[in-house]
Image: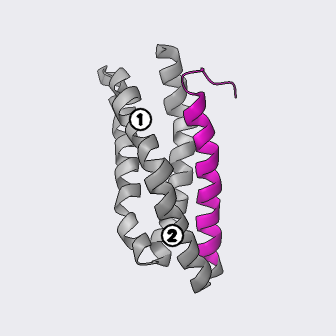
Amino acid sequence: MKRSPALQPLSREHHTALTLAKACERAAQSRDEEQIAKTCQRVIRAFSDELGPHFQIEEQSLLPLLCSAEMQPLVQRTMADHQQLRALLDGLRQHNIEALDSFGKGLSDHVRFEERELFPVIERLL
């Protein structure tokens, strides 16, 4: 799908996020403690380096564009997803398999929501 130039960098980051989400799900399914620990550490680094800043850009630059009442469900969903993923970081620091699996599934669902629902609306506003 061709994205607006303003959204292309974020959309490219979504591809990387989907790769990370799949790695989370694979590690959790493996039940291998070493793979779980390595993947948890990978997610923590990725959150610090990429996902956290990505969320901030969306929250500070994109979501304020959605100020009308009918857009609020998109804003609320985006913020709730971001908060849910942030909340799982404590479990990831403890190499918790359930947190890892939830993070992978949640990240995948969130990226798909943004690409299919949020970004098309923002592109119409740009």
Q: Position of residue 89 (x, y in %)?
A: 39, 64
In terms of image quadrants, where is residue 67? top left
Q: Residue at the location (42% across, 48% down)?
A: 52
Q: Does the rendering let one see residue 52? A: yes
Q: Residue at the location (47% across, 49% down)?
A: 51
Q: Quadrant of the N terminus?
A: top right
Q: Circle 2 sits in a helix, a strand or a loop, which is it?
A: helix
Q: Position of residue 41 (x, y in %)?
A: 51, 70
**Residue 103 appears left or right of 73:** right
Give the residue type that dot 2 points to: Gln
Q: Is residue 67 above or below residue 53?
A: above
Q: Position of residue 80 (x, y in %)?
A: 35, 47
Check disc 2: other Cα within 10 Å, few if <14, some if 14-19, many if 20+: some
Most common secondary structure along the magenta stretch = helix
Name the residue beneath numbered marker 1.
57
Check disc 1: other Cα within 10 Å, few if <14, some if 14-19, many if 20+: few
Segment colored magenta: 1-29
- Taking the magenta stretch, the answer to whether it contains residue 3 is yes
In the image, 50 versus 90, the foreground residue is 50
Q: Which mark is residue 116?
A: none
Give the residue type that dot 1 points to: Ile
**Residue 93 appears left or right of 34:** left
Q: Which mark is residue 41?
A: 2
Q: Does the rendering let one see residue 73? A: no
